[in-house]
């Protein structure tokens, strides 16, 4: 698919470039040709004027005919009655030139004699009968236009050649984000299918166990129902997360931004994690600057903190601690979520905000994670015009650093 698209983009670029070159070069060529034709016509009229008043001068300067031009006057019988003295053609060539111009039905045109091209123009006498024919050698003009066309052809072919390779390069560059998006979409669909299949398989297995033991009471099979309920909740969370990211991608998920107390919001979001952490012998502590106010979506900011604390809780071992810190920094607020887990490798730091990415796939899936939480956190921060990154903690573990403008 991408190979065909690459070729199509390249050919389209070459076609556009070729049309532009043809338009520009043709325009220049036509303008030059018309300009030379006008100069030739003026020169022929000067030659005619000299045939009428050869000795007349203008402004004190003799008006001389062009060096390569001459005239011949004919009577009504086409006999030569007057001619220029500067004719360089021999008798036979002059006879051929004169014969062709007399026989021509046109009042002007080009005649080729030997290797030279002459333009002629007939000027009939007002009294009738006689006619004066002015001639001008335009071989130099022809040669100039030929050289100009050759130069344009060489430049055009060279430009198309360079444009071809340049277009291939640009097409590859243009397709990179498309390829990346395509790969991410394929991986997203694959991962989503896998994540949905896992709870569905678990639900099916538990239902089969229940159906195989129809004589058992509901209470005796409670653990199978609990498993089904747990997997159903997990699948519901996954579907909700998928829908949220889909709406975010299509710009259909709007933030409701108002001024709110960030300190209070963080306190409310983090408080439930203190007893949860205590059950796992994990201490959850908070260091929050008071009355830090920002403009944003309070619900989404709380969701952000829940995601980061939930992530920290998963990776912090028994006996560890989690710290939530809020600091006011002038025009922005800075949030830190620290844990004492195993930390995140440098290779994983650039990928943890990708969808369905897990540092420890087995443990994350076992703990009910879908791999979408940090992707949602990243989206929330970006929608608020902030930034989020993960760094190594001084005493080990990881530190998620969030910066939000006020």
Image: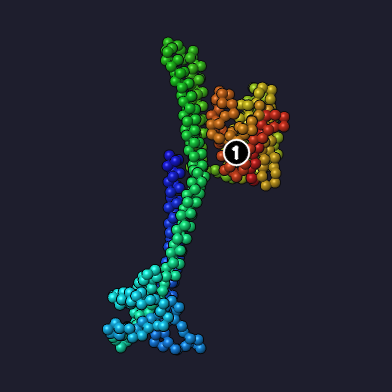
The residue at the point 50 percent across, 86 percent down is 61
Residue 285 picture quarter: top right
Q: Nearer the viewer, residue 135 or 213?
A: 135
**How many marks do you count on the picture?**
1
Q: Position of residue 225 (x, y in %)?
A: 48, 19
Q: Nearer the viewer, residue 406 or 337?
A: 337
The residue at the point 62 percent across, 39 percent down is 388
Q: Nearer the viewer, residue 203 or 31?
A: 31
The residue at the point 57 percent across, 43 percent down is 383
Q: Residue furthest front?
A: 91
Within-10-Å neighbours for mark 1: few <14, some 14–19, many 20+: many
Q: Nearer the viewer, residue 13 or 385?
A: 13
Residue 309 picture quarter: top right
The residue at the point 47 percent across, 51 percent down is 161
| Left or right of 21 in this view: 347 | right
Q: Is residue 30 visible to us here?
A: yes
Q: Residue furthest top?
A: 215
Q: Is residue 322 visible to us here?
A: no
Q: Position of residue 151 (x, y in %)?
A: 47, 60
Above-or-below relation of 361 to 224: below
Residue 117 picture quarter: bottom left
User: Which of the image's four quarters has the N terminus?
Assistant: top left
Element type at mark 1 = helix
Above-or-below relation of 261 to 122: above
Q: How is the image coloured?
A: rainbow
Q: Residue furthest left?
A: 77
Q: Position of residue 369 (x, y in %)?
A: 55, 28
Q: Position of residue 118 (x, y in %)?
A: 38, 73
Q: Check disc 1 and report the residue beneath it.
A: 301
């Amino acid at each position: 698919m991408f190979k065909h698209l690459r070729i199509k983009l390249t050919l389209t670029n070459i076609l556009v470039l070729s049309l532009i070159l043809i338009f520009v070069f043709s325009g220049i060529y036509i303008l030059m040709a018309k300009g030379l034709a006008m100069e030739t016509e003026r020169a022929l009229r000067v030659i005619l004027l000299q045939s009428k008043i050869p000795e007349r001068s203008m402004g004190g300067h003799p008006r001389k005919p062009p060096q390569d031009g001459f005239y011949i006057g004919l009577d009504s019988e086409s006999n030569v009655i007057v001619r220029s003295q500067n004719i360089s053609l021999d008798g036979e060539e002059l006879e051929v030139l004169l014969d062709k111009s007399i026989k021509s039905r046109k009042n002007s045109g080009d005649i080729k004699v030997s290797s030279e091209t002459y333009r002629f123009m007939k000027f009939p006498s007002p009294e009738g009968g006689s006619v004066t024919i002015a001639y001008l050698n335009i071989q130099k003009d022809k040669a100039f236009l030929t050289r100009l066309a050759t130069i344009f052809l060489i430049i055009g072919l060279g430009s198309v050649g360079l444009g071809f390779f340049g277009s291939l390069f640009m097409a590859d560059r243009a397709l990179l984000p498309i390829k990346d998006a395509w790969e991410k979409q394929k991986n997203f669909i694959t991962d989503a299918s896998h994540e949905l299949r896992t709870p569905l398989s678990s639900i099916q297995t538990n239902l089969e166990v229940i159906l195989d033991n129809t004589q058992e009471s509901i209470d005796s099979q409670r653990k199978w129902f609990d498993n089904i309920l747990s997997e159903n909740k997990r699948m519901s969370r996954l579907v909700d997360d998928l829908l949220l990211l889909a709406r975010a991608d299509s710009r259909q998920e709007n933030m409701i931004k108002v001024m709110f107390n960030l300190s209070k919001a963080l306190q409310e979001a983090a408080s439930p994690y203190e007893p949860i952490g205590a059950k796992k012998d994990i201490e959850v502590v908070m260091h929050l600057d008071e009355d830090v106010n920002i403009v944003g979506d309070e619900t989404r900011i709380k969701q952000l903190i829940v995601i980061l604390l939930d992530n920290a809780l998963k990776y912090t071992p028994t006996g560890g601690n989690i710290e939530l810190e809020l600091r006011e920094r002038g025009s922005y607020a800075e949030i830190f979520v620290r844990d004492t887990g195993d930390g995140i490798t440098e290779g994983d730091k650039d990928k943890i905000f990708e969808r369905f990415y897990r540092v420890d796939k087995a443990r994350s899936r076992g703990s009910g994670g879908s791999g979408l939480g940090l992707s949602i956190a990243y989206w929330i921060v970006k929608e608020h015009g902030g930034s989020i990154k993960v760094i190594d903690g001084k005493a080990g573990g990881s530190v998620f650093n969030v910066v939000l403008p006020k």
